[in-house]
Image (tube, rainbow, N blue to C red):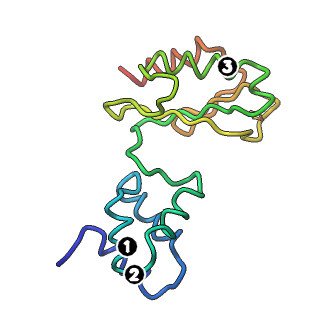
Amino acid sequence: MSNQYDEIITKYRFEEGNIISLLQDTQNKFGFIPQDAIFYFARTLEIPVSQIYGVATFYSQFYLKPRGKNRITVCRGTACHVKGSERILMKIKKEIGLDTHEDTTAGLEFSVDEVACVGACSIAPVVIINNKMYGKSSPDRLIKEIKAIMK
Ligand code: FES
């Protein structure tokens, strides 16, 4: 029986140990790695489920649940922390309707990630909204950008 993951799996069937590529292709296609994909890969490739989960959870690039259409990344490294990144993070989350512990809005409009230093400490605090970097930004300016996306 054909499955939606067959195209991806066919590429890697004969390449042993290429779980990372398998997961990257799955995430590129679906935006995250569905649980049933992991079970399907494990069964089809005869790899333990725990081994695939191990890789998927080890690398922060992989998401095991759906992500928002718009991505906001708040740097939480030391320099950004000193410059108020926590306050910025909380303001952004409040603006888009997320609780402190949540990272993706219910309608999948936004996902918010916290990362360690992104290597731009001289312009701290740093926030990245849909691949555009904002440095030395006030919470108000960032909220304005986010509101523009919401429209
Ligand atoms: S700590 Fe944020 S860019 Fe370095």
Q: Are marks 1 and 2 in contact (CB under 8 Å)?
A: yes
- Residue indicated by mark 2: 45
- Residue indicated by mark 1: 41
Q: Residue at x 41, y 52 (%)?
A: 32
Q: Identify whether 65 is placed above or below 28.
A: above
* Rendered location of residue 146, percent (x, y): 48, 22
* Rendered location of residue 124, percent (x, y): 76, 26
Please tell me in which quarter of the rendered image ligand 1 is found: top right
Task: Identify the element where label 1 is drawn.
Answer: helix
Query: Of callouts 2 and 3, which one flags the residue occurring earlier in the amino acid sequence?
Result: 2
Q: Which numbered marker is on residue 113?
A: none
Question: Residues under labels 1 and 2: Cα distance?
Answer: 6 Å
Quadrant of residue 17 in the image? bottom right
Q: Say which amino acid is labelled 3.
A: Ser
Q: Identify whether 88 is placed above or below 22.
A: above
Crowd class of label 2 (few under 14; some 14 to 19; many from 20; radius 10 Å): some
Front position in the image: 71 or 64: 64
Image position of 12 (left or right of 127): left
Q: Residue at x 58, y 11 (%)?
A: 140
Front position in the image: 52 or 128: 52
Q: Identify whether 147 is placed above or below 18.
A: above
- Residue indicated by mark 3: 137
Q: Residue at x 53, y 68 (%)?
A: 20
Crowd class of label 1 (few under 14; some 14 to 19; many from 20; radius 10 Å): many
- Name the residue at the left extreme: 1
* Rendered location of residue 66, percent (x, y): 38, 45
Task: Identify the element where label 2 is drawn.
Answer: helix
Query: Of callouts 1 and 3, which one flags the residue occurring earlier in the amino acid sequence?
Result: 1
Quadrant of residue 115 in the image? top right
Q: Is mark 2 within 8 Å of ligand 1?
A: no
Q: Say which amino acid is labelled 1.
A: Phe
Q: Residue at x 42, y 25 (%)?
A: 149
